[in-house]
Amino acid sequence: MNLHRFMAIVRKEFIHIRRDKASMMIALAAPLLMLFLFGYAVKLEVERVDMAVFDQDHSAQSRALVQKLKHTDYFIDRYYAGSDREVIEMVDKGIVKVGLIIPPDFERLIKGGKEAQVQFLIDGSDATTARTALSSTMLLSSDFGRDIREEMLKKAGPLGIGAGGIRALPRVLYNPAMESIKFTIPGLIGLVIQNITIILTAFSLVRERERGTLEQLIITPIRPIELILGKLIPYILIGFFDFALVMILAMTVFRMEVRGSMLMLLLFSACFVICALAMGMIISTIAKTQLQAMQMALLLLLPSVLLSGFVFPREAMPKPIYLMGFVMPLTYYLQIIRGIVLKGVGVDALRQQTGLLLFFTFLLIFVAVMRFKKRLD
Amino acid sequence: MEYAIEIHNITKVFGDFTAVDHISFSIPKGKIFGFLGPNGSGKSTTIRMLCGVLTPTSGSGTVLGLDIVKDAEKIKQSIGYMSQKFGLYEDLTIKENLNFFASIYGISGIMKKERIQEIMELCGLGEKQHAAAGILSGGWKQRLALACSLLHQPRLLILDEPTAGVDPVSRRVFWGVIHRLARSGITILVTTHYMDEAESCDLLGFIYRGQLMQLGTVEEIRQREGMHSIEDIFISYVERVSDIKVTGSFMEIRNHLD
Ligand SMILES: Nc1ncnc2c1ncn2[C@@H]1O[C@H](COP(=O)(O)OP(=O)(O)O)[C@@H](O)[C@H]1O
Ligand SMILES: [Mg+2]
């Protein structure tokens, strides 16, 4: 590798970037916009939640419980069902977010000083809503129990038999862990960085091919490694700047807190940026036109959203799909960034993921260099 | 005699189409070789095989004594090449393009500065050295491309239609440089559609449908064909091989319609 030739490529790429202000604005503004939109799409709190009630008691107390929920202005008793099945069906179909099942002996148990069990069914597929619904039902139920006890106490005096409470038995359907904004934002950072950086380099060689500058370039003594690495350098800086911007946005607007080592996060994020840029560079060696490069980038990006575990936990996936996730660098990066940001774990816990991310980074750069041929046939 | 280029039965097949069909020629050092032929006849394909960016389907050859398949990378260090399509960076200035290619050819430091200055004078580029290549006119662009291909003092210069779309004055300036370079001992292979340019070459090769139809000095070809005008010889080949009747002159075309 000749340092003069390498530096000549680096300088030339910087000039291209400097003179192409429109592309640079996109490269810098797009990640912020993406994080903002996606982030808010998840964050938006749903104000009101429709509820289906199956009241088997029809007592003053059961009605009081429903009233209590309604008074929050959060739950709406949209439907009254006639059976458990009907309630479950309505949650299934997404007609209501929450189902409430009150047992037939509700009032009797409470007045007898026992504990009555009410069941809440919560649709967990919308994590934010589910979380709010869950905590609200728990809170309101215990409030309700306390209200009754206080009332009885007033009536009967300290010597009367105390009233029983109610116990809410919440069951979250579909997404029991209710992974939401906190979990989503670090993953979103990974996804946004991947999308932007891949596109940055995917165009870099193809553009030269389309403009005819590549033919002039391959008839010089330039070596593939000098060209590929030289082209990567400026984009590594841009990719890392993008990462910094997105982190700042995540920590200020979305209040993301990094529990683990910030230094480690920066280090492996830099590694991931390089890895994604190398993927783009490989696309650039395959595609004949910029349009093709764009299509190939999409073909890579869309599955990565699903396979990497960004949306659904990978453990729940069918085996072949689960295995496919292992060839996506994003998979490892998501585990790394979530591990550091959410759990505050160190290198020890992430040894495998960091090792594989490094491995993929070197492998992909190697493939890009090998794939670039100074030939036209 | 020492040859800058020697090729034997070189052939290039794309799919089931033979773009270059068993071509052989030898070009002595220091000569200007004019490579003629209609569009699509295989000139650029032949040139790309010489430069080591296309692999011949069959046949062999040497450029400056180096094998065109095995030593492709070494050849690249000693030849200058100007592609048919403008291949420099339009967003870079004249000076930046020269700087870039100088570094790519391994010229650095004070040598680089001097060399760029020298080349800018030779090709008459100094005046607009800070103008972006993209805004230059055709003649300037071609002179810049020539300058970039000369930086590393190549012993062989390969120019693919360097004067296509260039005005008559700029063409003459350009060829002035070419002849000066030939005097200094550089071998030049140049393709062109202009017969006045062709007539000033030392050697001519005429290629049609991938086959080399004629090879020799301008005088030799004139005598062999019994015609004075190279353009008429050129047209008579196309007529003979393709059975197409080509009207002799542009005035005839006009009169024919009147
Ligand atoms: N990479 C390629 N694949 C297929 N056909 C090609 C390729 N390059 C050139 N050709 C074909 O080979 C023929 C000769 O092309 P070329 O050498 O560019 O002609 P010239 O330079 O004489 O105009 C043309 O018909 C062209 O379409
Ligand atoms: Mg051509």
Image (spheres, rainbow, N blue to C red):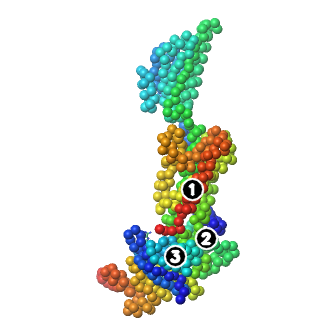
Q: Chain of mark 1?
A: A
- Secondary structure state at the residue bearing disc 2: helix
The residue indicated by pointer 3 is B68
Amino acid type shown at disc 1: Leu
Q: What residue is at 55 percent from the left and 11 percent from the top? A: A111
> Is residue B215 visible to us here?
yes
Amino acid type shown at disc 3: Ile
Q: Chain of mark 2?
A: B
The residue indicated by pointer 1 is A364
Relative image position of residue A148 (x, y in whole percent): 58, 14
Which image quarter: residue A22?
A: bottom right
| Marks 3, 2 in one chain | yes
Estimate the spatial distance between the alpha carbons at disc 2 and disc 1, rounded to whole Å.
Answer: 25 Å
The label on residue A321 is none
* Vertical arrangement, residue A245 with respect to residue B154, above or below: above
- Secondary structure state at the residue bearing disc 3: loop
Residue sitting nearer the eye, A344 or A210: A344
Q: What residue is at 31 percent from the left and 80 percent from the top? A: B243
Q: Chain of mark 3?
A: B
| Marks 2, 1 in one chain | no
A174 relative to A142 in the view: left or right? left
The label on residue B104 is 2
Estimate the spatial distance between the alpha carbons at disc 3 and disc 1, rounded to whole Å.
Answer: 31 Å
Relative image position of residue A145 (x, y in whole percent): 58, 17
* Vertical arrangement, residue B72 with respect to residue A124, above or below: below
Tell me which numbered mark, 3 or 2, is placed earlier along the sequence: 3
| Marks 3, 1 in one chain | no
Relative image position of residue A57 (x, y in whole percent): 47, 15
Amino acid type shown at disc 2: Ile
